[in-house]
Amino acid sequence: MAQAQFNSFRSVPKTGVIYVMSEAQRLGFSYGNSEWSNLGQGAPETSNLWDDDTRFSSIDVSEMSSEYAPVAGRMDLRQAIADLYNQRYRLGKSSKYGPENIAIAGGGRIALTRVAAALGHINLGHFLPDYTAYEELFEAFYRFVPIPIVVDKATGFRIQPELISNEILNRGLGAILLSNPTNPTGQMIENESLAEVIDICRETRCASVFDEFYSHYVYGREKPLSAAEFVDDVNDDPVVIVDGLTKNWRYPGFRVSWTLGPRDIIDSIASAGSFLDGGASHPMQKRALSMVGIDEADKQFHGIQKHFSQKKDYLVDRLKKMNFVLPGEPNGGFYCFASLENLPPSINTGMALFEQLLERKVICVPGEFFDINPGRRRQHIKSRLEGFVRFSFGPSLEELTLGLDRLESLLKSYA
């Protein structure tokens, strides 16, 4: 039935990636269909990828875990996650995370929705380009005003501390939200630059919310990436971190995530969960206990480094040979954000290339979907990212190769 028949409900737009997948499914795509190559994939491979990579195949549901879990999450899981961050990032520091600094949620979007619901009447800085799902998240809550911060192609889409400082001071930002490593560009703030960002937020009392769902996908580093390393006082520094099993443990179907931060902020976030979602799955939380210990977590990190770095190098090399331009080669995540400026005019926009590739059973994501524009406030200009596309190296090497071969065939047809 037409939407107009239900005037009490608004038409909710699909996020960019959901639109892409809906269009592909309309043409016959289904997960596991070997005829298709999903280079738009927002999830990593979930199979055994290395010799000691043991994947869970069952979930125990006991009488106790059939009950509701606490809205903030099981206390033992919260303690285990606090221990993981303390061991990885806070050795030698007097201020440590405890279970009161952790809230468990049913996946990354739920965790971010809780954070958004807990924000006050502030200006919230967000970066362009960034994660497509932020757009509707920003529009769903009216207490804060989303303020876009443009990251320049000329800098390879790298976020500089000076930019953050200027935006906080000039626009009166009360908080900033960013993915680190960034989706879709694969850039990241690390080392001294990340420490400087934390210092800026500490001095200005501007809260920083780090989406760290790709923190195991950091290439050339000896340990994962996290803002937790540069926090001085875990209960005073306004630093909030969101992560989970989805990407870094390669269990997107588990829908288990966590938010880490000062206990007063976590208390507000958990309170938001009491009316938004009621808490994460109890059996899934119980299973997650054995997954977040330091040994299993580090095994995932090192395995991901080796396996995905090979696919990254392969994708980057082939895209360059096909005349794509990469303003900033990815050093994190599992995406390449490629410019189409050297492609023929009929396929040098993300939407045009997306539509052409769909006909060849290959999926990609047009760059304009990462031009976060809540409320469509920038209707008078075309997207500055329409000449980009995101390719994922999340799929298997076999599927990646299939998609790139078809992409190369498409380009040769225009030669």
Image (cartoon, rainbow, N blue to C red):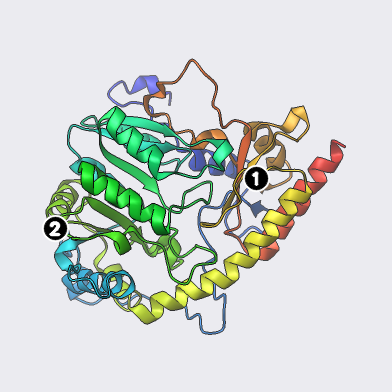
Residue 264 can be seen in this image: yes
Decide if residue 7 is on the left or right side of residue 64. right
Quadrant showing the N terminus? top left
In the image, 21 versus 221, the foreground residue is 221
- Classify residue 26 by image quadrant: top right
Percent position of residue 295, x then y: 38, 81
Percent position of residue 5, x then y: 36, 20
376 versus 282 height, above or below: above
191 versus 27 height, above or below: below
- Classify residue 32 by image quadrant: bottom right
* Residue depicted at x 17% and y 36%: 120
90 versus 135 height, above or below: below
Indicate which disc residue 263 carries.
2
* Amino acid at circle 2: Arg
Mark 2 lies on a secondary structure that is: helix
The residue wearing badge 1 is: 326
Q: Earlier in the sequence, mark 2 or mark 1?
A: 2
Task: Count up the numbered dots.
Answer: 2
* Residue depicted at x 69% and y 42%: 325
CB atoms at circles 2 and 1 under 8 Å apart? no
